[in-house]
Amino acid sequence: KTLKDLGDLKGKRVLVRADFNVPLDGATITDDGRIKAALPTINALRDEGAKVILMAHLGRPKGKVVPELSLAPVAARLGELLGVAVPLAADTYGDDAKAKVSAMSDGDVVLLQNVRFNPEETSKDAQERAAYAKRIAALGDVFVSDGFGVVHRAQGSNYDVAADLPSAAGLLVEKEVKALSHATVNPERPLTVVLGGSKVSDKLGVIENLLDKANRLVIGGGMVFTFLKAKGYAVGSSLLEEDQLEKVKGYIDTAKQRGVELILPTDIVVNAGFPAGDTPIDPQVVPADAIPEDRMGLDIGPESARLFHDAIVDSKTVVWNGPMGVFEVPQFAEGTRAVAQALVDATAKGAFTIVGGGDSASAVRNLGFPEDGFSHISTGGGASLEFLEGKTLPGLEVLN
Ligand code: 3PG
């Protein structure tokens, strides 16, 4: 169900679950992509004359009030973006939330305090969660699920509350589902999947599902060293998940059997260690099959960047999840930049390109790429990965 199915919303109190789990440096939001992504739904509801009551989580405060995880910076940023004041309730469903909601006029926006300050939000006890969800539901007349980043969770404010109110997906959830389905259900081919990020163990489900669907699998990031090791190469002191080696060997074989082209880097940018503390930044490019024992791989090299670029640009559908290296440090950001540029070039040639959420979405924005260089930048981290794994997502299922 979508917004249209909720009928006339004029004067109605619309509870909207958003995903405002943004990266913070102290109280400064370092990437407001998730807040901007929520604006179409908020504006559509305001235009209809609804009272918009937003709920969201920030971080993992584990049921305690953690002042550093207050949604205050989000309320302030939202206010700037919307051009109206967005009052923040001191609690999620208590006296202040009730008072702020009763004082609302049509078109107003209120943000409730971090739902995860309540232990019931993430409780494993379904009854406890349901009782809590009822208290939240009492604040609204209808529920809109627009926090795509949390649809893989079954928690009070995004899952249980849907049982108590007429519910529908917001515009962001609708757009995300459309885009991710477009790339995975009957995609235009070749379909190239680019995976990076630090841990191969986070991507096992995606690899398994996409080995069935993709024409090409391009691997970089910290996870690639387990692939290079599985091929018998020396990886020095690079990140390695020994316990995944057998699985990864199996993937290499499966790719071969199924005719999926597996593209691994041919050169690597190494350093004496992770660039933190006293470790100097002294990048060198070495062949991917001969990383010196005392060096750590931190990015793909320039030859690999060209190889990846060519594979991506020659695709009709591209799904990318996970940075190619330690992009936060400029000397190790070139691989990630090259892949982002390749997606931009592919988009310009008419391909459908998706940047999976989390770190890759932040990387794209922080490296200065324009949003419209890609067909879709997902706001989901874990959620978009689980979608790509082909899993059933509880926060979506509950809306059906
Ligand atoms: C995310 O950042 O991926 C979502 O906001 C979900 O957060 P969580 O992993 O803490 O549930």
Image (cartoon, rainbow, N blue to C red):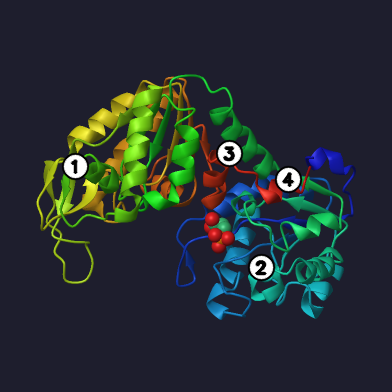
The residue tagged 3 is 390
Nearer the N terminus, badge 4 or badge 1? 1
Q: Nearer the viewer, residue 75 or 380?
A: 380
Could you classify mark 3 by the number of other residues whose Cα lies within 10 Å: few (under 14), some (14-19), or many (20 or more)? Answer: some
Q: CA distance from mark 2 to mark 3?
A: 24 Å
Q: Which three-letter amino acid code belongs to the residue tagged 2?
A: Thr
Q: Which residue is mark 2?
A: 122
Does residue 157 lie above or below 342 as drawn? below
The one nearer the camera, 154 or 366, is 154
Mark drawn on residue 397: 4
Question: Residue sitting at 79 percent across and 40 percent down?
Answer: 1
Asked whether, in this view, residue 20 is left or right of residue 302, the answer is right
Q: CA distance from mark 2 to mark 1?
A: 43 Å
Q: Amino acid at mark 3?
A: Gly
Tag in front: 4 or 1: 1
Counting from the top left corner in percent of width and height, residue 124 is at: 68, 68
51 lies left or right of 41: right
Element class at badge 1: loop
